[in-house]
């Protein structure tokens, strides 16, 4: 009985779990880049694991490596040109997030093999070369997934990370410049960064035809 239960749980886990690759780019918004989307993007890549609890809800973990760069020289504002600040930081992003599919997502059914989705969760980021490299952030994302086959899926996504620090770009408000203080940034304007890209996932081996809690009768 115990062996049968273990095998059943493993089968469900295989049917509802995916592993895959992330490829895309990262960019930064904060005191240096205050509003421009996709300014100074840099290549990023990583891996992900997704567990599908139902046709609507998934839990996903991911790790990717990218880079955040920005330079006052690219600004149109005189204040920033005078400040002449620039930074570059390699980041390692660890994210755990929930995904909600707007449509019923059934990878082996051509009528339901796609869906837009939204996601949120928690991120732990290591930002190398910054005064405080270890930070927590909140990911807020949108995406679209499409099943190429019962095992292969692809999609696009765009996810912002809201951090709780102004240290990623090292513009931290006031700076001691010999005999006086000068403003280098906005102390209450925390940094953001984003990942935009594509993913390709592989669903673990399927069981024989039957009812699967996540995908109904569509596996064969």
Image (cartoon, rainbow, N blue to C red):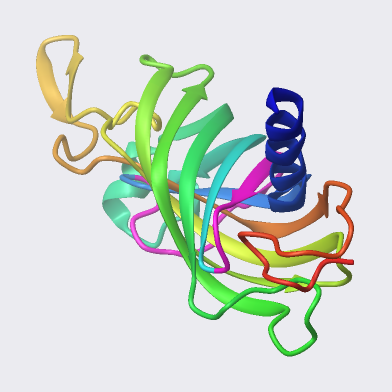
| Residue name at image x 47 percent, y 35 percent | 86
Q: Is residue 8 above or below residue 211?
A: above
Q: Is residue 140 visible?
A: no
Q: Position of residue 57 (x, y in %)?
A: 50, 60
Residue lying at 87% horizontally and 59% vertically, measured from the top left: 151
Residue 218 higher or lower than 48, as above or below: below
* Quadrant in which the C terminus is drawn: bottom right
The percent coordinates of residue 128 (x first, y second) are 54, 18
Along the horizontal axis of the image, is 195 left or right of 185? right
- Whether residue 61 appears in magenta in the rendering, the answer is no
User: Residue at left 78%, top 81%?
Assistant: 109
Name the residue nearer the viewer: 119 or 180: 119
Which residue is at the far left?
180
| Furthest-top residue in this view | 178
Farthest residue, direction bottom: 111
Nearest the viewer among 184 and 201 is 201
| Point 50% across, 22% down: residue | 126
- Residue 198 visible in the snapshot: yes
Give the residues in magenta.
32-55
Q: Quadrant of the N terminus?
A: top right
Q: State whether residue 122 is above or below residue 56.
A: above
Q: Is residue 189 above or below residue 141?
A: above
Between residues 200 and 158, which one lies in front from this camera angle? 200
């Amino acid at each position: 009985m115990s062996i049968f239960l273990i095998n059943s749980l493993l089968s469900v886990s295989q049917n509802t779990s995916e592993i895959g690759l992330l490829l895309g780019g990262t960019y930064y918004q904060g005191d240096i880049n205050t509003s421009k989307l996709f300014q100074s993007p840099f290549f990023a890549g990583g891996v992900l694991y997704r567990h599908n609890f139902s046709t609507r809800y998934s839990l996903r973990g991911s790790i990717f490596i990218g880079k955040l760069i920005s330079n006052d020289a690219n600004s149109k504002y005189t204040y920033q040109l005078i400040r002449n600040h620039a930074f570059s930081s390699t980041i390692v992003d660890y994210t755990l997030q929930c995904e909600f599919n707007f449509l019923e997502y059934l990878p082996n059914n051509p009528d339901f093999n796609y869906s837009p989705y939204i996601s949120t969760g928690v991120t732990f980021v290591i930002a190398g070369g910054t005064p405080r490299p270890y930070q927590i952030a909140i990911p807020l994302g949108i995406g679209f997934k499409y099943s190429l086959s019962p095992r292969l899926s692809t999609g696009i996504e765009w996810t912002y990370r809201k951090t709780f620090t102004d240290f990623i770009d090292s513009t931290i408000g006031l700076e001691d410049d010999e005999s006086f203080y000068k403003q280098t940034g906005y102390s209450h304007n925390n940094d953001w960064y984003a990942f935009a890209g594509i993913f390709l996932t592989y669903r673990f081996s399927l069981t024989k035809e039957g009812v699967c809690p996540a995908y109904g009768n569509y596996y064969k």
